[in-house]
Image (tube, rainbow, N blue to C red):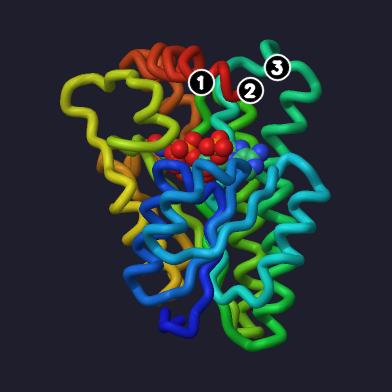
């Protein structure tokens, strides 16, 4: 769909590294922006910068998700971006922590797609963009919860795309790999092996604009070796897991999860 000055775009997790870039890009494309996140103070500077409306909502809470929907009004572009890292071995998580990751990363986007999708279908236009991850295509040891939510998001989005096609509503999923400069990987300060490629938050934001404008089903925003790894994983998960282990990938995942422990 075309993005115009009449378009209203909502971004969840808007104060995060990638959410901020997406909100700025949609604003630069002409849309009116609704920023959501769980901390008003963290959202305020960006809201002022781009003249956005703010809805504070903790997406782990059903009542906050419903209130966010009620307060949002008519939305033309919904970018469902908020997530927790959900990293580390499952056996380190207690039941409440597991529920929180599932709620923020999967239940909230599904409920939002249900809510906004119905209204978009009624108007015969709109776009829903899910921010998944290359971890929605490649499962690695120590990432089971994150993999569960990001793989789940992929299947949900592909099926929903079929449901909403006839109603003029686009559904897309963007799959970032390692993102430098800002966001949940950059925040860990974990170094990648020499030569490992990264992409920027602005690269993800450009992919979102393309997804909305052209209604592209899926876009990878990742270095060549990660995209190739995802394609090979679809054919032979065991082989890719062995390669990941041999190249030290599990150690990187462990270092990331250590640095992200405070977000459980
Ligand atoms: N960075 C990467 O390398 C990378 C790679 C692949 C995929 N992704 C995906 O990209 C998306 C954005 O991630 P990011 O890198 O920008 O991470 P980030 O900087 O940690 O941002 C995540 C956002 O989600 C929000 N959030 C977390 N829990 C929430 C809750 N209970 N209620 C409402 N909002 C909540 C955070 O709010 P607070 O600031 O209040 O916690 C923050 O705004 C995520 O879906 C992530 O899985 C990122």
What residue appears at the point 46 percent right and 42 percent down from the top-left corner?
16
Tag 1 near tag 2, CB within 8 Å? yes
Q: In this image, 46 relative to 157: left or right?
A: left
The answer for how far apart the CA atoms under marks 2 and 3 are is 8 Å
Taking the view exactly as shown, the residue that stands out farthest to the left is 195
Q: In this image, 216 relative to 165: left or right?
A: left
User: Callout 3 environment at 10 Å: few (<14), some (14 to 19), or many (20+)?
Assistant: some
Mark 1 C-beta to ligand 1 under 8 Å: no
Tag of residue 260: 1
| Residue 217 location (% of width, % of height) | 48, 65
Tag 2 near tag 3, CB within 8 Å? yes
The answer for how far apart the CA atoms under marks 1 and 3 are is 13 Å
| Residue 7 location (% of width, % of height) | 49, 80
Query: Does residue 48 lie above or below 256 as drawn?
Result: below
Tag of residue 93: 3
Label 2 sits on a secondary structure element that is: loop
| Residue 186 location (% of width, % of height) | 35, 30
User: Callout 1 environment at 10 Å: few (<14), some (14 to 19), or many (20+)?
Assistant: some
Residue wearing tag 2 = 264
The quadrant the C terminus occupies is: top right
Q: Quadrant of residue 113?
A: bottom right
Residue 23 visible, this orientation: yes
The answer for how far apart the CA atoms under marks 1 and 2 are is 8 Å
**Mark 1 or mark 3: which is in front?**
1
Label 1 sits on a secondary structure element that is: loop
| Residue 251 location (% of width, % of height) | 40, 12
User: Callout 2 environment at 10 Å: few (<14), some (14 to 19), or many (20+)?
Assistant: some
Q: Quadrant of residue 229?
A: top left
């Amino acid at each position: 769909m075309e993005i115009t000055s009449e378009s209203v775009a909502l971004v969840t997790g808007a104060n995060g590294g990638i959410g901020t870039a997406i909100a700025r890009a949609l604003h630069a494309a002409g849309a009116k922006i609704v920023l959501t996140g769980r901390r008003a103070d963290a959202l305020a500077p960006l809201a002022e910068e781009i003249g956005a409306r703010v809805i504070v909502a903790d997406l782990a809470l059903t009542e906050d998700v419903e209130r966010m929907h009620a307060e949002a009004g008519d939305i033309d572009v919904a970018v469902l971006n908020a997530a927790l890292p959900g990293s580390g071995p499952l056996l380190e998580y207690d039941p409440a922590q597991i529920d929180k990751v599932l709620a923020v990363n999967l239940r909230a986007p599904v409920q939002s797609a249900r809510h906004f999708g119905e209204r978009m279908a009624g108007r015969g236009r709109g776009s829903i963009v899910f921010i998944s991850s290359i971890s929605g295509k490649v499962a690695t040891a120590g990432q089971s919860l994150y993999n569960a939510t990001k793989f789940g998001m992929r299947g949900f989005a592909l099926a929903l795309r079929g449901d909403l096609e006839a109603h003029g509503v686009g559904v897309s999923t963007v799959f970032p790999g390692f993102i430098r400069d800002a966001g949940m990987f950059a925040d860990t300060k974990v170094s990648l092996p020499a030569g490992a490629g990264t992409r920027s938050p602005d690269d993800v934001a450009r992919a979102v604009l393309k997804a909305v404008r052209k209604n592209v089903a899926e876009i990878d925003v990742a270095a060549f070796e990660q995209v190739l790894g995802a394609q090979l994983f679809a054919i032979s998960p065991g082989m890719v897991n062995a390669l990941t282990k041999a190249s030290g990938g599990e150690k990187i995942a462990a270092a990331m999860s250590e640095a992200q422990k405070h977000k459980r």
